[in-house]
């Protein structure tokens, strides 16, 4: 096996590419979808609780 020893120095060129900045519209859309899903879960739980009484 021909292994190379690890490099002791860190070169900035070796860094992985940075992730692109997410689009703010997509971020807010994701928050909106998550909030709507959470609201539906709460409403469904309240309906089920009220039905069991």
Image: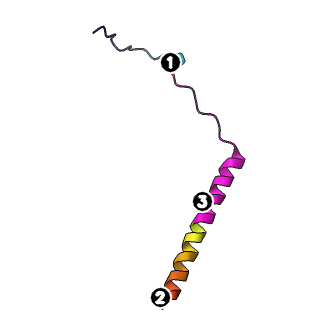
**Magenta span includes 17:** yes
- Residue 10 in the image: state x and y as whole percent: 45, 17
Q: Position of residue 8 (x, y in %)?
A: 38, 14
The local crowd at label 1, few if under 14, some if 14 to 19, many if 20 or more residues have their Cα within 10 Å, is few
Residue under the image location 35 percent in, 15 percent down: 6
Please identify the quarter of the rendering in which residue 9 is found: top left
- The relative height of residue 11 versus residue 42 in the rendered view (above or below) is above
Distance from Cα at disc 3 to Cα at disc 1 = 37 Å
User: Which residue sits at x=60%, y=70%?
Assistant: 39
Identify the residue position indicated by label 2 in the image: 52
Q: Contact (CB < 8 A) between labels 3 and 1?
A: no
Q: Which mark is residue 34?
A: 3
Task: Please name whichever residue, 15 or 2, is drawn nearer the observer in this view of the structure.
Answer: 2
Residue 38 place in picture, x, y as percent:
57, 66
Count all numbered tags in the image, as a single digit. 3
Q: How is the image coloured?
A: rainbow
Q: Nearer the viewer, mark 3 or mark 1?
A: 3
- Dot 2 falls on a residue whose secondary structure is loop
Contact between marks 2 and 1 (CB within 8 A): the answer is no
- The prevailing secondary structure element of the residues shown in magenta is helix
Q: Which range is magenta? A: 14-37
Q: Residues at badges 3 and 2 in contact (C-beta under 8 Å)? A: no
């Amino acid at each position: 096996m021909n292994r190379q020893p690890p490099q002791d120095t860190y070169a900035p060129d070796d860094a992985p590419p940075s992730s692109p900045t997410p689009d703010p519209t997509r971020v807010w859309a994701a928050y909106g979808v998550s909030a709507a899903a959470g609201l539906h879960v709460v409403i469904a739980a309240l309906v089920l609780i009220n039905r069991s009484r």
